Amino acid sequence: MYIYRPPTPIVIKLTDEWGFSMRQKAAEYMVANRNVTGAERGTAEQQGFGALAEIVIRNKLGMPEINPQEHPLAYDLLTPSGIKVDVKCRGGS
C-alpha cells in the first residue's frame, strides 16, 4: 500500500558570499525584467523570490544564466532531454 510522505524541501543557504552574489543577480534581473502584465503575475517581491530561486537552481545545475530574450513564460528551465521545469519557491527571510 502506498504511504504518502510530504516532499522534503531543498534548503539552500544564501548568507555567504556566494549567496550574496545570487541575490545581487536576482535584484539586477528584476530591475531590468519585472513582469507587469497579466492577471496571474505576482508582486515585485514574489517575482523577486521566484527569480532568485530560478537563478540559484540554474547555478546549482551548471546551467547558463537566464537570457530574458529567450526565456519563455510557460516554464523556467528546459533540460537537455527536453523536459520543461517550473521552479517554485516560498518567499521568506
Image (cartoon, rainbow, N blue to C red):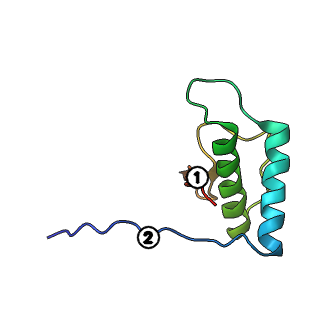
- Nearest the eye: 30 or 72: 30
Q: Position of residue 49 (x, y in %)?
A: 66, 51
Within 10 angstroms of label 1, few (less than 14), some, or many (20 or more) residues?
few
- Residue drawn at x 71%, y 55% is 52
**Relative to 53, is 72 above or below?**
above
Label 2, secondary structure: give it.
loop
Label 1, secondary structure: give it.
loop
Name, please, the residue furthest toward the top. 38
Q: What residue is shown with label 2?
A: 8
Q: Position of residue 63 (x, y in %)?
A: 73, 62
Question: Which quadrant of the figure contains the C terminus?
Answer: bottom right
Answer with left or right where residue 49 lies relative to residue 84: right
Of the two numbered discs 2 and 1 on the same chain, state the one appearing first in sequence.
2
Q: Quadrant of residue 74?
A: top right
- Tell me the distance, in whole angstroms, between the alpha carbons under discs 2 and 1: 25 Å
- Nearest the eye: 70 or 28: 28
- Residue drawn at x 61%, y 36% is 42
Within 10 angstroms of label 2, few (less than 14), some, or many (20 or more) residues?
few
Q: Quadrant of residue 41?
A: top right
- Residue drawn at x 77%, y 50% is 66
Answer with left or right where residue 9 lies relative to residue 36: left
Q: What residue is shown with label 1?
A: 82
Answer with left or right where residue 2 lies relative to residue 13: left
Residue type (three-letter) at the residue carrying disc 1: Gly
Residue type (three-letter) at the residue carrying disc 2: Thr
Q: Position of residue 73 (x, y in %)?
A: 64, 36
Q: Which mark is residue 46?
A: none
